[in-house]
Image (tube, grey):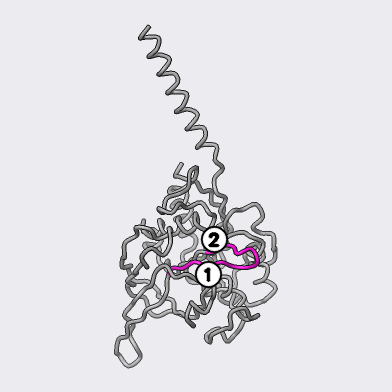
Amino acid sequence: MNTYKNIIRFVSFAFILVVSALGQSTTAPLKVLLISGGCCHDYANQKEILKTGLEKRANILVTQMYCADGNTHPNLGCLNDPDYAKGYDVVIHDECAADIKDKKQVENVLKPHRDGIPGVNLHCAMHSYRVSPEFVHPMQPGSENALWFDYLGLQSSAHGARAPISISFIANASPITHGMSDWTTIDEELYNNVQPPTNFPNHSSLARGSQLQKQKNGATKLANYVVVWTNHYGPKNVRVFSTTIGHSNPTVQDSRYLDLVTRGVLWAAGKLDDDGKPSAGYEPR
């Protein structure tokens, strides 16, 4: 009799494990569109580093939109097709398109986000789609010239020479950075903040970066800018995560960077718990 009961217990336990495993495996992966290409970066390799890193860390499936044009006006599919993100849960902008200024094309890029698809923006995406030639000056949030900056929740125009950046996370700012420790990068580009990010009403700073920068007169100056933040954009209050860090391949390969970007993607999609871990079903497969 005891043997029979033990068999029943074993079968029941095994059934529970199988059902639990099936329940997890049937959660559809988060569909992410990664847009990359353009000037000044090794996108051919970085897009693969990002895809592998994200898919390793969460239940995410990354599809590429890549343009091998190494110039400042890459021929990206999102420029002329406003429905380019149909069927995706999140769009990552990792392109360098500094000379794409046509407002109609920028509106095409923004349309999915206005329609409710969350966005993630990495490094040179902040220096893309600046429709006004006066972008070195503050653009009034909400104005026609601030199209891309309103989406980002921050305005940047330039960076200094490459040097280590000390990243300081703002305590308890977001589950994205929950438990993350400050760190110092290798030689990287620190992007400036043209105007106080708080001028953008839905901006929330998550980390600042400081860097010693050499001046023309030979002196050094400590520059300090927001380097990680979130924003809520458009009529549907869509979630947007951004970081200006990520110029060099070793930085993009850094586990701390990939952890940060993965959390940003999950947060944007509403799949990140308060403790910084993926929501149920979105753990690594």
Q: CA distance from mark 1 to mark 2?
A: 9 Å
Magenta residue check for 229: yes
User: Quadrant where the N terminus lies?
Assistant: top left
Crowdedness near tag 2: few (<14), some (14–19) or many (≥20) residues, C-alpha within 10 Å: many
Q: Amino acid at mark 1?
A: Ala
The residue pinned by badge 1 equals 125
Q: Is residue 184 left or right of residue 113?
A: left
**Vertical arrangement, residue 67 with respect to residue 203, above or below:** above
Magenta residue check for 34: no
**Vertical arrangement, residue 16 with respect to residue 184, above or below:** above
Residue 157 in sight: yes
Q: Which residues are magenta?
A: 228-240
Crowdedness near tag 1: few (<14), some (14–19) or many (≥20) residues, C-alpha within 10 Å: many
The residue sitting at 31% across, 62% down in the picture is 181
Q: Amino acid at mark 2?
A: Ile
Quick one: label 1 or label 2, which is nearer the N terminus? 2
Farthest residue, direction top: 1
Between 273 and 261, the residue placed more toward the observer is 273
* Mark sitting on residue 156: none
| Magenta span dominant secondary structure | strand
Under circle 1, the secondary element is: helix
* Mark sitting on residue 92: 2
The residue sitting at 43% across, 54% down in the picture is 274
* Residue 102 in which image quadrant: bottom right
The residue sitting at 55% across, 62% down in the picture is 239
**Vertical arrangement, residue 48 with respect to residue 19, above or below:** below
Q: Position of residue 14 (x, y in %)?
A: 43, 23
Between 53 and 3, the residue placed more toward the observer is 3
Q: Position of residue 228 (x, y in %)?
A: 43, 68
Q: Position of residue 272 (x, y in %)?
A: 47, 53
